[in-house]
Image: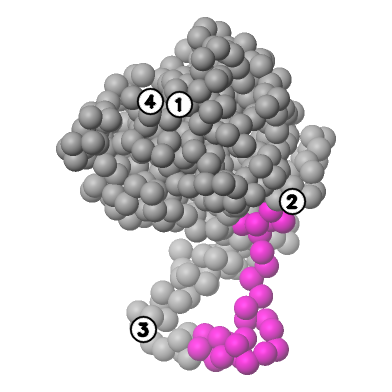
Amino acid sequence: MRHLARREWLKLALKGSLGLATLSSLQLGLLPRALAAGRAVPEGYKALVCVFLYGGNDSLNMLLPLSGQSLLDYQAARQSLAVTDPIALTPRTAIADGLGLHPALVGLEPLFHSGALALVGGVGSLVRPTTLSEVQAGKALLPKNLFSHNDQQATWMRGQDPHSPDSGWGARLLELMYDVPDFSSCISLAGTNLWQRGAALSPFGMSAAGVPELTALKGSGKRAAMLRDMQSRLFSAQQHPLADQFALSHSQAQSRSAIVATALSQAPVLQTEFNNANPLALQLQMVAKMISVQSLLGVGRQVFFVGIGGFDTHDAQNSVQPALLGTVAEALSSFYRATVELGLSEQVTSFTMSDFGRTLSSNGDGTDHGWAGNQLVLGGAVNGGDLYGQLLPQRLGSPVDMGAGRLIPALSNSQLFGSLAGWFGADQTAQQLLLPELSHFDSGALSLFKS
């Protein structure tokens, strides 16, 4: 169907002459192309929601020991940064000196005890299992530019796959399941990102307010006039490849935005409250609205990306981090309640990622770039109420301290990714294709989800 004809169909649909079901049958991006290719499509609906904490969250202060020598070691290492009033948790698996949660995360405590929240400890980017002796001898194969923000953000979004430097495991996961994934299966509320970039897929961008109106050609300024002139010249060209591409991309952008806006207009009004002053909560509120209309969009699998910055706490950490963690806890709690309200809590899993952990030792007012840290996994299908991985010893000079309290991960982030991918529908073979580095680790180490 030519792009001009598609626009006419879209106009009719938006005027109410055609329904979304008809639009989907016209291949406006709503029908997964895997059906046309004859590939088996996963049954049911599932969504992964990546919550990226930009800057490198000091997640070692999210989970901490409560008593004994572990607590004394923690206090000695963290000095003025030590949390003095943690929330005591009671995980199913015994932890020698107890397990505490940062008090700013109090909103997550009931989710942990109800079994919807799992904690993943001692996790980080690893190329191979690594020991302190290997690091000290210079024989360890370390991630590239280990303490660089950009490189480590890319590592978490991409995985360690050396064959896919420009794609992320979120997009690759969809591309393993669908011949050409539908555009509405990959949605970002926090801009462009590597996690959702694939060979044939890029994220459809939205804001917390919804789909932005495409007004670039409608203005009265010089830029709008220039764009209209360029459009006129290109459309008047005969069989010009640039004109064809411009027309196609312009038509797709208009069509896709209109499709999403039309679907959202039919979203139920959520009774769950989201704090309008919490930017992450507003992003997740829009994710919940998009999930509520997934049946209208005709997608069985979706990956969403949201994010919040400010976690590069080289200074003022005692005031900055509690506020940030409180923002995250409030947003995640509201989002989970919304999925329960929609009856989709078991079909939606959210999880955190960040650049890296931070140093145990204080630089006087904050922390510097580290390595291992802790992450959160939340959802109705999660086998929560427990810690997976390890609560690493928070002691300077421990067998996992490579210097200045930079802790060597006990668990590869690829093992976390593989567990999430397995729940999403990727079998062991698909997980190995998605994350080739899994062959160096125990791919079944994390039983994060209910059987």
Label 3 to label 1: alpha-carbon separation: 66 Å
**Amino acid type, callout 3:** His
Q: Point out the tag, 2 or 1, that comes first from the N-terminus.
A: 2
Give the labeled residue for mark 4: 398
Quickly name the residue at label 2.
Answer: 265
Q: Amino acid at mark 1?
A: Arg
Image coords of residue 451 (percent x, y): 47, 12
- The amino acid marked with disc number 4 is Ser
Horizontal side, residue 21 vs residue 373: left or right: right
Residue 191 can be seen in this image: yes
In this figure, which residue is indicated by the disc labeled 3? 240
Question: Within 10 Å of the Cα at label 1, are there few (<14), some (14-19), or many (20+) other Cα atoms?
Answer: many
Tell me where the magenta segment starts and ends, as one range: 206-232
Residue in the picture at 61% in, 60% down: 257
In the rendered view, tell whether residue 320 sits above or below residue 95: below
Out of 405 and 338, give the one closest to the viewer: 405
Q: Find the distance from the CA under tag 2 to the CA under tag 4.
A: 56 Å
> What residue lies at 42% left-to-right and 81% top-to-bottom?
243
Looking at marks 3 and 2 on the same chain, the residue that comes earlier in the sequence is marked by: 3
Q: Earlier in the sequence, mark 2 or mark 4?
A: 2
The residue under label 1 is 395
How far is mark 3 from mark 2, CA to CA? 37 Å
Label 2 with label 4: CB-CB less than 8 Å: no
242 lies above or below 47: below
- The residue lying toward the viewer, choosing from 435 and 27, is 435
Q: Are marks 1 and 4 in contact (CB under 8 Å)?
A: yes
Q: Is residue 24 visible?
A: no
